[in-house]
Amino acid sequence: MLRGSCFLLSFVLLSALGAYGADASRVRLAPEPSWLESRPKSDDAAEPPEPSGSGLYYLLLDSQTQVEKQEAYARIVYKITSAQGLQTASQVSVTFDPLYEWIDFHRLEVRRDGKVENRLSLEKMQVIQQERDLDRFQYNGQLTAFFVLDDIRVGDVVDYSFTRRGRNPIFGSHYGDVQWSTWYAPIRREWIRLITSTERPLAQQQLGDSPLTSKTSTVGSEVVREWSASDVKAITVEPDTPGWYMPFSFLQLTDSQSWQEVVVWALPLYAPTEPSEGFRAKARALAANAGPRGDAIAAVLDFVQHDIRYLGMELGPRSHAPGDPEHVLEVRYGDCKDKSRLLCALLREIGVSAVPALTHSRRSRTLPEWLPSIEAFDHVIVRIQHGGRTYWVDPTLTDQSGTLENRALPNYVWALPIAPRSTDLERVENGSSGEALLVPSLSYREEPKRTKGAAAVQHQRAPRSEIEVVETFRLGQPGEPAELQVESTYRGLAADSMRSYLRRTPKEDVARNFLNHRAKLMPKIEPRGQPAWQDDEIANEIRIDHRYRVPDLWKKEDGQQVLVAELYPSLLHDYTSAPETLVRTAPMSLPYPFRVATRTIVHLPEEWNLREEDTRIEDEAFTGRATVAKSGNIVTLSYELATLDDHVAPSRMAEFARHLRQLREKLGYSFTFNPEIAKRNATFRLNKTYLAVGLGAVIGWTALAFWVFRRPWRLHQPPLVSPPADLVGLGGWLVLVIFGIICRAITQVVFIVTGHRAMFDGRVWDRFAAGAHVTFCVELAMQLGLLVLFVLSIVTFFRRHRIFPLLFVANFAGVALFTLVDSVLVANLIGWSEANTMEIVGTVPALVIAGAIWVPYAFVSRRVKATFVHGSASKPEATPPEPPPLVLAE
């Protein structure tokens, strides 16, 4: 390892020295170009409107480009406003590519107290090759010319300008650029000037919240476009933003009129070449050795991902031009362009249609908002069409496994296939054909913009990146050690990440890391052997099994004899922690698509009386669930979180944090054991309080029922004429009425016995708090009241009591009232849940519908009026004699 590091350091130093000796001639001192337009002198006395964290204040930013001459001029004037800016402001540097660019320096001045010091001297300039992307295995060969400024102080003004001549020949005659109009520091004045030929079409757009003032003029055969702004505020970059979010405003310029033009430009770079016989033989051999999966495409992809190492030699035109597939196969290395072109060439040899596709590693989601441009992309993947389906793969990913359907892919949303008939961006997974995608603006507006015109094809849905953990605790008697078995399953990108970790980490370190993770909550935990894992290469799943002994699961609370066993799903803790910044202007990123779940199965030494729970949390960005279930002596605690989007909008942060807190508060469960209570509760102990409440309720409700029954109700006048005999009696629809009431009474008895029987045992009663005791007592009293109401209704029905119609209506009202009150009491005790809502939704509407049918019947039906006419003495009311028949006079 040390030899490798020394070799790499030597390589970089030799490259830097060679660059200085060979390419310093590409940097010179020269006058400003003749096509330049001068700007007003900067106001050195100006102060920033508000303090800047960068310690700099840009007094002037002047960018002028002559496209046809391939020259770009820049002048930067900044003032150092605090000690923070001294570190970055005391060095002036310009990076360039020595294969096609030259740098002309025009000025380098330091102004202090009205005095101007000229610091421009080639003798004080250094040229080095930094290779900033060396840690990413990318070499671009760019050089940096820089000046170290001596004696720089707070309040100094630094003014320098230069012209960059030349342009990457890989772009041919195409032109495209991005000009930033906001930055980390405030800007006093900024200008952007662009000169093009009248024959060059140019598209432009401004993105962001700081628009520029623009004007266009034509001078002879040239078009001059200018943009300007004043007093531009500094941009504060907030943490945890999505990769596609761009906090800075910028101006995009391009002469490409469509994405098809970009395809036409790229087609020659990725054009198929005539393969050698050796290349064809390699492709056939890879397909023939597909292994147990029998998937030739996956076998070829595995080879390119694992056997062709990632290394980018992006020198000059190679920044965008891929290498020849045969050469890449020979040297066994390449970057995303090289590996994608190689994969396509190998797949074509086995009869599979595959083309490269341009995308962006971070802002792919917002590509439809960009104007068609070569500069819109920074990554290449591959689109495979096979068996009537479309697959997208990334040849640069390593440690992947599974069939094409199960291969995970980062959240690339849009890509531009490099194929002759390709004319537009295409969706990468994330939906089916014809589905529009909601794409937030780069300037991030609260309402996302629905894109139109981007082609959509049928894709397979990307496998969800997910982690599932099943913990099985086997608890002995309180105070005894517990056994723990953990089975962790990783899928999708989580499986790729875990596979990489397991391959590069010694097994002993893996075991120690898992053990230390558990020891945070259980300090005395002991391993039971080494972890064992299985890699399902077809399903792209990794299962890890590890076992432990936990001597200290039961712990005594301070100063008490009570034993407590606390179980907490630590895996979900990191994903439910409160966001660090709630008040923000930028969206907060989320892992997506992602699901994490923990199921804790607890085998208790005996049946434990506890209340089952099922809490669901619904948010626009995630769904969460926490459940407590019991079956005999087995308790199952389940927790789950699944993201629904890759970000949270700033306006929703408070709501998101509230929902996240609701889920976080449901995590974990504590089992308590009190030896004194256990000793006292060794046998059944009558709960006298509950018995007294029950007897009191029965006596009270019965007394009320007796009073109602004996009271001389006068609900309606007896009929003046005796009703027909066939309408008198307990027949007709009344049979259904009494059948329903009897069924309700029987159901109520069963419900009271099964629901409250355990509470008559004092051992069970003591496990609940005082608030729960009140709730149980009110529930019992109300349920006994309903039972008395049903019994009274049955008695008055068969006695044909005139109060029965009113009691019949009271049946509906009583059940509805009990449902509402009971839900409120339970919600006050454990919080409102979906179960409360479902109980109300399932009961009250049904009662309303039934009441709408039967209540009118009870008061309108002639049979009801003719049948229920008796009073409390159980004797029919006297009815007046029938009047004599009327005789009409002739």
Image (cartoon, helix red, strand yellow):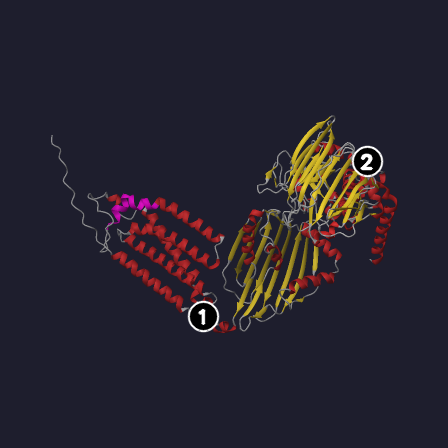
Residues tagged 1 and 2 counted as in contact (Cβ below 8 A): no
Task: Please identify the residue farthest to the front as the structure is shown.
Answer: 114
Residue 855 in the figure: left or right of residue 549: left
Q: Name above or below for residue 829 compared with residue 654.
A: below
**Can you identify the residue that label 1 sits on?**
684
484 in relation to 589, above or below: below
Task: Give x and y (percent) for residue 176.
Answer: 73, 36
Residue type at mark 2: give it. Answer: Thr
In the rendered structure, which amino acid carries the disc numbered 1?
Phe
Q: Residues within 10 Å of mark 2 (few under 14, many from 20)?
A: few
Image point (73%, 62%), residue name: 509
Q: Is residue 241 left or right of residue 117?
A: left
Name the quadrant containing residue 72: top right
Q: Secondary structure at mark 1?
A: loop
Q: Quadrant of residue 44?
A: top right
Front-lying residue, 273 or 267: 267
Element on which disc 2 rests: loop
For marks 1 and 2, give the CA distance: 87 Å
* Left or right of residue 656, residue 724 in this image: left
Instruction: Give the x, y percent position of residue 403.
Output: 70, 46
Residue displayed at 59% across by 55% down: 576
333 or 607, which lies in front?
A: 333
Res 273 label: 2
The numbered mark, 1 or 2, whose residue comes first in the sequence reads: 2
- What residue span does the magenta drawing correspond to? 854-869
Does the segment drawn in magenta span residue 217? Answer: no
Residue 728 visible in the displayed image: no
